[in-house]
Image (cartoon, rainbow, N blue to C red):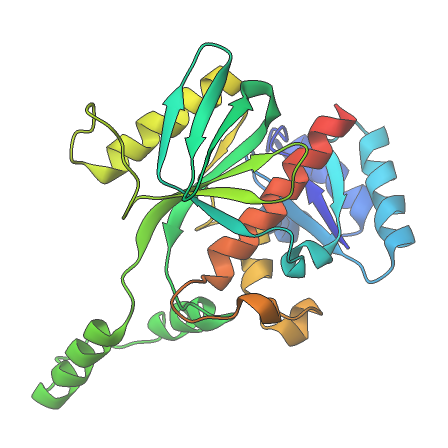
Amino acid sequence: MLVLLGPGFDGSDQGYQTLARATGLVPYDLRTRVKAGTWGLVRVFADAGQAQELASKLMALGFQVVVVDRQVLTDVERRHVPVSSLVFRETDFLLKLKDREMKIPYGALACVVEGEVQPGRGPGTASSAATSSGTLRAVAPGGQEMQVFREAQLAAPMGYLAADLHFSTVLWIARIDTRVFDFGPERTGNVSADLRKLTAELAERSGVRIDRNVRSSSVASFAEQPASLRGASWPPLSQRGKDALDARFDAYSRLLGEAERLARRAG
């Protein structure tokens, strides 16, 4: 069970001190786990009762806290459904899927999770790369090393920008894949700008948050850990495929979607 602190945390010294007293963690550790304006992972428990006890204590102190079951990472109902286009309307928006169209009331949206998807990225790979890169010396690569690097770059699947739309009442996730999404006649050709403009308008009309913190979040770091450390199998057996999944972003998106859904219910 994951105890997550909400984005309303102000990041003040007093806030960290209060968290430290309630959690038993030192302020330095908490500063690496939780930051203002984004969801942060406070503690992970195997026992649901312990997780809820800490969450209740933090809520009594005025913090926004939810307890998310790590099983959301392997829930086959939380599948990604590709969206080909989106049309804004007065009271709802129209999602165009592969074989049908859906009218979604703005109030049904729980949150938007936006970031870069790197197909084939598995648990632990990015962390390992980050650790090793910090110990590299500034040396000039030889011809053979450069050739290996080029071949690796050619073999690796290309990353792409995406946005996941999470809903309050259903578990499936609508994914905007910028490689195939139709931004319509107002597109500028700058994929990043077009996506940000689209999600900003959708979030404003729906009154929800856009999360773009996958690169720095402690929740994403947890999601990226090998299954032996997370205590769960990732990805689900029915969805394993190197070209489709990103263990970091996909898992992070699922956890954030559930956190926002629980927060809306409690709100």
The residue at the point 43 percent across, 42 percent down is: 99
User: 111 or 106: nearer the eye?
Assistant: 106
Q: Quarter of the image for the N terminus: give it.
A: bottom right
Q: Position of residue 125 (x, y in %)?
A: 44, 72
- Residue 159: horizontal and vertical position, in percent? 30, 58
Residue located 50% across and 63% down the image: 247
- Direction top: furthest residue: 90
Q: Farthest residue toward the front?
A: 99
Decide if residue 183 is on the left or right side of residue 213. left
Residue 10 appears in the picture as rendered: yes
Q: Residue furthest left?
A: 143
- Could you tell me if residue 207 is visible in this image? no
Q: Position of residue 236 (x, y in %)?
A: 61, 67
Q: Is residue 124 left or right of residue 195?
A: right
Location of the C terminus (image quadrant): top right
Residue 50's x, y, as percent? 89, 53
